[in-house]
Amino acid sequence: MGDRAIAMKYFQIAGVVSAYWLISISLVFINNSLLSDEKRKLDAPLFITFFQCFVSYILCIILSFLSEKLPSLFRFPKVSHDFSTLKTLMPLSGFFVAMVTFNNLCLKHVGVAFYTVSRSLTTVFNVMFTYFVLRQTTSVPAITCCGVIVAGFLLGVNQEGQMGSLSVFGVTCGVLASATLSMYSIYTKKN
């Protein structure tokens, strides 16, 4: 591979990561606006989850079709409706839907700033589930970092409580979102 090809590959990776980051952050703010705005009084986190998953599914079908018709422009995996594949992916889909649902419930009950605190345990759950599900050990420095993360989480919860704006349900949903995201990534790695 020449220097130009390597540069294009890095540019493509940077583009995908940037797009993912932009879309993720945008969805956090959109969901927060939809679920927390007093004027809207929209109490539909499960419908929002369903709608976002449905739109993602439709986009995958469209991109798969376009990839088939215009392979020189971009690549996207072919969407398959094979029953055995669907059966295999069911636990993964369950974790994904649970993660998005708990994310939305968390955003409904806490602000965006505290949302990041309530979701901070993802790394800790990744280390735990990697050990319990995949039977892989983690280094002592990584476990030490997990201790720092837990301490930061507890400090954040404590300070939110001191300000009088702590939502135990919101924090619980954030922790469950972190746990289901970790299980989603573990099952992705396992399969």
Image (spheres, rainbow, N blue to C red):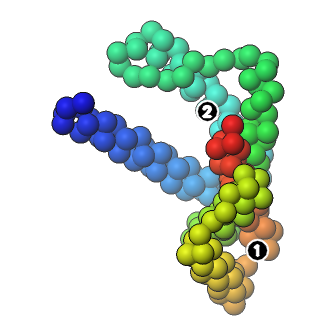
Q: Which of 187 and 173 is in front in this view?
A: 187
Q: Residue at x 68, y 53 (%)?
A: 181
Q: How crowded is mark 1: few (under 14 residues within 10 Å), some or many (20 or more)?
A: some
Q: Name the residue beneath numbered marker 2.
A: 56
Q: Distance between the residues labelled 2 and 1?
A: 30 Å
Residue 44 visible in the shown view: no
Q: Which mark is residue 129?
A: none
For the residue labelled by badge 1, is the local secondary structure a helix, a strand or a loop? loop
Q: Where is residue 79 in the image (x, y as percent from the top left)?
A: 62, 19
For the residue labelled by badge 2, is the local secondary structure a helix, a strand or a loop? helix
Q: Which of 24 and 34 is in front in this view?
A: 24
Q: Residue at x 79, y 21 (%)?
A: 84
Q: Where is residue 106 in the image (x, y as percent from the top left)?
A: 71, 62
Q: Nearer the viewer, residue 163 or 7?
A: 7
Q: Quadrant of the N terminus?
A: top left
Residue 138 figure quarter = bottom right
Q: Which residue is drawn at 50% across and 54% down?
A: 25
Q: Name the residue beneath numbered marker 1.
A: 167
Q: Earlier in the sequence, mark 2 or mark 1?
A: 2
The amino acid type, in three-letter code, at marker 2 is: Ser
- Give the side of residue 89 with respect to residue 76, left or right: right
Q: Where is residue 191 in the image (x, y as percent from the top left)?
A: 69, 37
The amino acid type, in three-letter code, at marker 1 is: Ser
Q: Residues within 10 Å of mark 2 (few under 14, many from 20)?
A: few
